[in-house]
Image: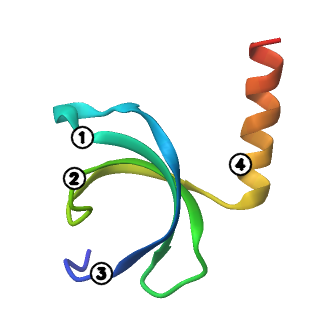
Amino acid sequence: MADDFSFEITQKYGELGKGKGGWPLELNMVSWNHREPKYDIRSWSEDHQKMGKGCTFTEEELRALKGILDTMFT
């Protein structure tokens, strides 16, 4: 796996809580390696230069997740 990669946070939606190590767990739109941005949930350092493990979602996947969550909490 290549060590070099690029990322750009194109939209910040909000903080979900604190992740491991106290970093904020955030929902953002992130472009990885100059690709189309995806919805992304992961913890970030305060300066957004380091990150924890996370999950990325297309809009369709995020809508499916929302549907599942809606059935769990209604």
- Badge 1 marks a residue whose secondary structure is loop
Above or below, comparing residue 12 to residue 63 in the picture: below
- Badge 1 is on which residue? 23
Disc 1 + disc 4, Cβ < 8 Å: no
Q: Earlier in the sequence, mark 3 or mark 2?
A: 3
Disc 3 + disc 2, Cβ < 8 Å: no
- Badge 2 is on which residue? 46
Q: Earlier in the sequence, mark 4 or mark 2?
A: 2
- Badge 2 marks a residue whose secondary structure is loop
Q: Earlier in the sequence, mark 1 or mark 2?
A: 1
Q: Which numbered circle lies on residue 5?
A: 3
Answer with left or right where residue 31 lies relative to residue 4. Answer: right
- Badge 4 is on which residue? 62
Residue type at mark 4 is: Leu
Judged from this view, the residue extending furthest toward the top is: 74
- At x 73%, y 51%, the residue is 61
Q: Earlier in the sequence, mark 1 or mark 4?
A: 1
Disc 3 + disc 1, Cβ < 8 Å: no
In the rendered image, residue 22, in percent from the top left (x then y), is placed at 20, 33
Answer with left or right where residue 56 lies relative to residue 60. Answer: left
- At x 79%, y 42%, the residue is 64
Q: CA distance from mark 4 to mark 2?
A: 25 Å
